[in-house]
Image (cartoon, grey):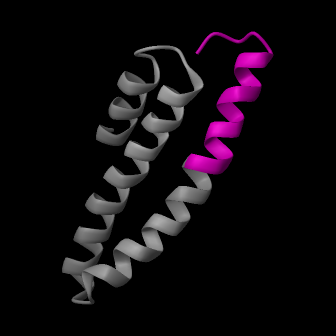
Amino acid sequence: MIASYIAWKIGTSRHSKISEFIGCSLATLTITFIVGTYLAFITEMPYTLWWGSIFIGSAISINILGYMLVQVVKRLGIQI
């Protein structure tokens, strides 16, 4: 929820593609830090291992696929 709020707040601040991409990037970093940290704590594995793997997955799903989906939805005229 924290990452979604950050992405929404930044992404709608100026209604530009750059602010939407920055919002997606901050959501990726937030998820990477939170999820990677608690998984490292639970599994007692290195933080960097979890942060790296969570970052890669989040970057693909949020920054690439999610950003493209936002642009398609906007072009179709659907208000988000």
User: From what the image shows, is residue 53 above or below residue 28?
Assistant: below
In this image, 20 relative to 29: left or right?
A: right
Write the residue at 58% across / 15% down: 80
Residue range (magenta): 63-80
Most extreme residue toward the right is 76
Most extreme residue toward the bottom is 45
Inspect the magenta stretch and tell me whether residue 77 lies in it.
Answer: yes
x, y (%) of residue 24? 48, 40
Q: Main secondary structure of the magenta part?
A: helix
Q: Nearer the viewer, residue 47 or 41?
A: 47
Write the residue at 53% across / 36% down: 21
User: From what the image shows, is residue 13 above or below residue 61?
Assistant: above
In this image, 80 relative to 11: left or right?
A: right
Q: How many marks?
A: 0
Write the residue at 36% across / 78% down: 50
Within the image, what quadrant is residue 39 found in?
A: bottom left
Most extreme residue toward the front is 18
Write the residue at 63% across / 38% down: 67
x, y (%) of residue 61? 60, 53
Q: Quadrant of the N terminus?
A: top left
Within the image, what quadrant is residue 16 found in?
A: top right
In this image, 20 relative to 69: left or right?
A: left
User: From what the image shows, is residue 28 above or below residue 51?
Assistant: above
x, y (%) of residue 48? 31, 81
x, y (%) of residue 79? 63, 10
In this image, 74 relative to 21: left or right?
A: right
Q: Nearer the viewer, residue 60 or 19?
A: 19
